[in-house]
Image (cartoon, grey):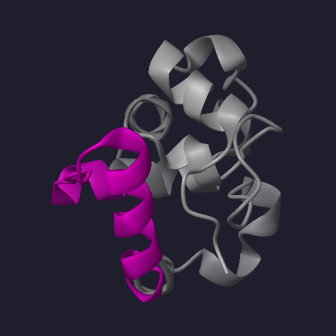
């Protein structure tokens, strides 16, 4: 697992639209700061929590990105590694976000989360 690759994926694939890390990103879903991840240190629990939120994530992806984000098993492992690595998270800044992702965050999601 690569926390560095996970950092890039987190920004580029749009996870950051809803989830903040290091005060970068949206606030409509739980923060994924490593300091808040005590209950999800187990990767199976982390992915189970993602699965439970899948419907909302898919609707938001389609509405805001125009497509459903596709993750490989390796992508998910790398994102999980990033959520566990506080020092890598400290390296995430607004400048890491692609412009279209930054615009979505600035304008808010198209579909409010309930």
Name the side, left or right, on which 66 lies relative to 78.
Answer: left
Residue at the image position 57 percent from the left and 34 percent from the top: 104
Query: Where residue 13 sits in the image (x, y, percent)?
Result: 37, 38
Residue 43 occupies which quadrant of the picture? Answer: bottom left
Query: Where residue 14 sits in the image (x, y, percent)?
Result: 45, 41
Please tell me which residue lies in front, 60 or 46.
60
Residue 98 shows up from this direction: no
Is residue 64 in the magenta section? yes
Residue at the image position 38 percent from the left and 77 percent from the top: 54
Is residue 9 in the magenta section? no
Residue 30 shows up from this direction: yes
Name the side, left or right, on which 44 lies relative to 92.
Answer: left
Q: Is residue 95 above or below residue 21?
A: above
Residue at the image position 48 percent from the left and 52 percent from the top: 81
How would you classify the magenta stretch by its main secondary structure?
helix
Query: Where residue 112 sits in the image (x, y, percent)?
Result: 64, 66
Please tell me which residue lies in front, 72 or 42.
72
Q: Is residue 83 above or below residue 55?
A: above
Q: Tally the marks.
A: 0
Q: Is residue 24 above or below residue 18?
A: above
Query: Where residue 79 sits in the image (x, y, percent)?
Result: 43, 50
Residue at the image position 55 percent from the left and 52 percent from the top: 110
Quadrant of the image containing the C terminus: bottom right
What range is drawn magenta here? 51-77
Name the side, left or right, on which 65 lies relative to 88.
Answer: left
Q: Is residue 4 above or below residue 78?
A: above
């Amino acid at each position: 697992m690569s926390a560095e690759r996970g950092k890039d994926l987190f920004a580029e694939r749009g996870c950051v639209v809803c989830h903040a890390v290091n005060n970068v990103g949206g606030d409509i879903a739980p923060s994924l700061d490593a300091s808040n991840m005590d209950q999800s240190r187990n990767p199976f629990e982390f992915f189970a929590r993602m699965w439970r939120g899948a419907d909302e994530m898919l609707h938001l992806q389609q509405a805001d990105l125009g497509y459903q984000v596709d993750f490989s098993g390796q992508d998910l492992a790398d994102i999980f590694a990033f959520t566990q690595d506080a020092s890598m998270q400290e390296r995430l800044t607004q400048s890491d976000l692609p412009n279209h992702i930054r615009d979505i965050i600035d304008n808010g999601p198209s579909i409010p989360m309930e």
